[in-house]
Each structure stands twice: as structure tokens, then as C-alpha cells.
Image (cartoon, rainbow, N blue to C red):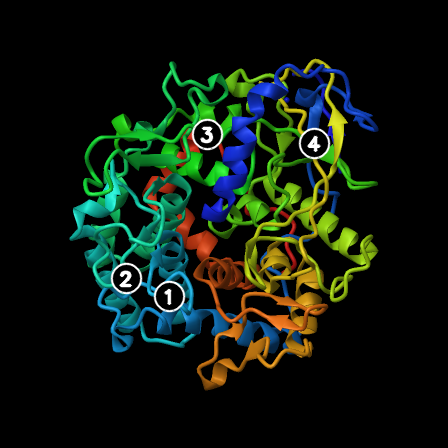
Amino acid sequence: METVATPQTSRWALWPLTSLALAGAAACQTLPVAPPKDSVTVPGASLITIASPEGTLRPPFSFSSEDEALLDKVERGAFNFLWMQGSPDRGIATGMAPDRTSKTTVSVAGVGFQLSGICVGVERGWITRDQGRERCELILRSLMNQPDNRKAGLFYHFLDAQHAGQPAEAYERCVSTIDSALLMSGILTASQYFGGDVRIMGDRLFADADWQFFIAPPDAKDPQIRGFMTLGWKPAEATAPTGAGALLPYGWVDNGDEHRLVTFLGVCAPREAHRVNPAVYYRMRRQLGHYKDSGPMVWFPWSGALFTSFFANCWINYAAMGPDDPTFWGVPQRAHVDWWENSRRIAAMHKRKAAENPRQLPGIGKDSWGMTASDIDGGYAVPGLFPEYLHMPGAQEPRDFVQWPITDDWGDGTVAPYGAGSCIMFDPTGAVAALRHYRSLEVGSSRPLWNDPDSGGYGFQDAFNVGAKWVAPDCLAIDQGPLLLSIENARTGLIWNTFHAHPCVKAGMERLRLHLDHAAPAAR
């Protein structure tokens, strides 16, 4: 229920999009502050609260026995990928799952999902606790023993699978704040779950992460990013990965799951010199939009890909928090937002637009939805859908919003199962219906979309396109990972509970004045 308060309230593939958007942001500053065409006017943003209708059920949810059986299979398939692909039995000396099945290069973001996924594997009885602990120790030891794989404690996005040392030759060499944040989220989860040497190594790696190093300085060329976390750092010489270099000229300025996760972990840093001011979390823009009768929602203007609404939710238990309060931090024109509800609205918009299917794309409909980053036939794409602008009286551009030409991008009609599947945290009925549909789908390709986990298969391939009769040849760690964690959270809350039990996360929550409300409406 939207309430009006009284005046007292990238994933690496996204980098090119973010870079383009921020590079053009200066031009946006010259646009008029009048409402965009066809926009709807709402009260000043600081008077808006985005909250759930009364009685809305929150996770963990109850599922039928048939649905539980389906979810068991999907989770097991995703876990098989993260476990088997990084196995030393396959010659992977570091224990790290590669970025995709056809490569040996490691994405540290995928390793973050892997570390958390190992905890799920133990709880589900797919591996023993000793097996999980040993693999996590191997991964963390591999990361620690190669100092050239990081700068100021944050990691290069892509590493060599065998040595976890020099950044992978096949990719642009950049230290990535978001990929490091995904890695650190997994490290904190495994640290809390296993304790012992996993905790000693994991907590050391997290303590060494200097998030403050990646804050854009007051003299940054782009004034919009000053004081915000940058996307990363690039060395001046590829042969000197820890030597001289420069911060990337792009920042986490708007609100998306990646932006909040990076900044949240910066606030959680145990060393004060490495820590980010909590106010930065609330300063990020909260641009408002809506779709038909959805009510207001905060949206990310540079990409409508669905993953930008559930990555942080894999670890941060927004479902148990309710609306936050930016006004305490003296930040004007910021709605009070329940970020779980906000993601629920964005997921509902994606599902509704897929059912409407304005381009009549084959294979897209009420049970096949969630435009998001994935492989496509011939490459990689980041399609996405957007709400309509809500005009916010009193808001200032670019501090509070940007006017950027947006249009829904349906790509070539390719659908990635992890998109709708990961939204099980917000819409269990819609997500399970989508997963059941994908499970039974005959795409017409010679390659099956589903591979039986009981036979060692990884469940769903990364993506499919019914019109082209195409199924992706690969599975990806950064897609299998969120699918696994999201389903487990929706069923048991395991990852949320473990992550939030870590002392560093508890301290960060206190600094941010965020609290878990375990009395929130639940399905059990």
C-alpha cells in the first residue's frame, strides 16, 4: 500500500551500458526539469513510501509437495554446476567454478555465488559438511595466496582458474567493485556458516577490502559521481596489476541491486579507514516510475534488466526490513522504500508486459518472462523493460533524477530461466509457474533446455529462444548462482539468515539504521 507520510519520512556485462549512460549524463543536465512527456505527477519524493499492501505474504513461503519436488531439482542442477565445474577432479586446482561451462576463466562474482551455494549443498545433503568446508578452504586459500589478483583488497573481475593470480588474459583487466561485492557476500556467508579456517581466511579477506579507496574523489571529472563508489580501477600497465592505475570514471549513483550491495558492504567494513559513510547509501538517486496500477517504484534508468532487481536480495534480507528512512541522513527527495516490495513491483511489471507481449514474440508470455542479461545466439545481450516516469515536484536534476530516453528492449526474444526463477523471492506463484513451464518446454533445438540433475546435469541451460529454435550451449555461474540462492531463500531463508548473522553485517546494519523485523507477514 502506497502511503503519503506527514512531513515528519552490473554485472560486468552491464558495464558498457553504464559507461555509455554516465558518459552522456552531463548532457542530461541541460534538459528542462519539466515532467517528461506522458509522465504522472506525484507528491515530492520524500513524502512517498513504497510499502506492501496489508497482508502481503513474505518469504519463507510454503510450497506444495509437487512444487517442492520441482524446486529440489532446479536447485540441485544449479548446485551441480557450481560444485562440479570447480572440482579439483576436473583439474581445477583452485576449486573455483569457471564463469561458464565452455571456459576455464573464473569470474569472482560467480565464486561468490559458489561459496554461498556450497552452504546450500551441505544443508540439502548433497555434500557433507567436511566436503563443503574443504572446498571453501581451497577457494579462499587460492585467493589469498596470489596478491596480484587484487588492488586495495578488491579483486579483478576475471582470474585464471588454475592459479587465481594474474587477471585472465582474454578479458579487459579491471578491478570490479560489484564483482568483488558479490564475491565478498559469498565469503561472509561461508565464513559465518563454516567457522574455523574458513572464517579466519574469509574475515581476513573482507577486512583487507578498502572500499574507501574506490570512492570517487571531490575532483572527479564527472561531478555526478563525486563521493559515490566507482565501478572499479584499471592498472596503467597490464604487466603491473597492483601498480599505478586509475579509478574508472563511472559511479554507482542510481539505485539498483548492484549499487546497494556494493555500498552496503562498504558500510560493513570492519576497519574504519576502509569504511564508506552510511549516508552514501541513502544519497543514491531514487528515481520514481510506475506501470499502470503498480504504484510507485524506484527504477534504474540505464538498464531495465531484471537481474538489477534481485542480486542484492540474494544476501540482504530486505523482505524482513520494511521501508527505510533517508530523511535521517538529511537527503531530500528520496522516497522511503521497502526494497523487497520495490523488487516485487518490478518483477510484476516484467511478468505483466510479457503477458501483453506487444511485439508478439514467440516463446514470451505469462509463464515465460523476465528480460535479463544472458547469452543469445551469437553473443551476449542485456535486454530490459522500464516503467513510465513519475514526475517528482521539487526534485532537482541530476541530484534526484535524470531524463534519459528509455524504451523497452525485448532483444531478440531470448529468455533466461534464471530471470523469472530468481523472482521466487518476491512472487513464488509466478516464478514456480515459469520454472514448470521451462522444465516442460520443447524449444525445437537439438540441444535440450533441461538436463537431469540426478544424472549429473546442471538443470537449465542459460537461455533459449523459441522463435529461433535455439538453446544456449553454456551454463553461467552468475545465472545459476542467483537461481540457487533465491530459491533457497524463498524456501528456508538460509542465505539471508547466515549472511545477517555475520558480525560485520550486523555492524553495518546498525550504522545504516536498518533492522530486521521478524514479525513481518509470512506464509508460515
In the image, 136 versus 158, the foreground residue is 158
- Percent from the top left, x then y, of residue 509? 43, 36
In the image, 365 versus 31, the foreground residue is 31
Q: Amino acid at mark 4?
A: Pro
Quadrant (top left, top right, bottom left, bottom right) of the N terminus: top right
Q: Amino acid at mark 2?
A: Ala
**CA distance separating discs 4 and 1:** 36 Å
**CA distance separating discs 1 and 3:** 30 Å
Residue shown at 48%/84% (left/top)? 454
**CA distance separating discs 2 and 3:** 29 Å
Mark 2 or mark 3: which comes first in sequence? 2
Name the residue beneath numbered marker 2. Answer: 161
Q: Amino acid at mark 3?
A: Gly
**CA distance separating discs 3 and 4:** 20 Å
Q: Amino acid at mark 1?
A: Lys
Mark 2 or mark 1: which comes first in sequence? 1
Nearer the camera: disc 2 or disc 1 = 1
Name above or below for residue 423 compared with residue 93.
Answer: above
Say which element carries label 3. loop
Whether residue 36 can be seen here: yes
- Percent from the top left, x then y, of residue 253? 51, 28
**CA distance separating discs 2 and 1:** 9 Å
Name the residue beneath numbered marker 1. Answer: 103
Mark 4 closeness class: few <14, some 14–19, many ≥20 residues within 10 Å = few
Mark 4 or mark 2: which comes first in sequence? 2
Name the residue beneath numbered marker 4. Answer: 405
Label 3 near label 1: C-beta < 8 Å?
Answer: no
Whether residue 516 can be seen here: no
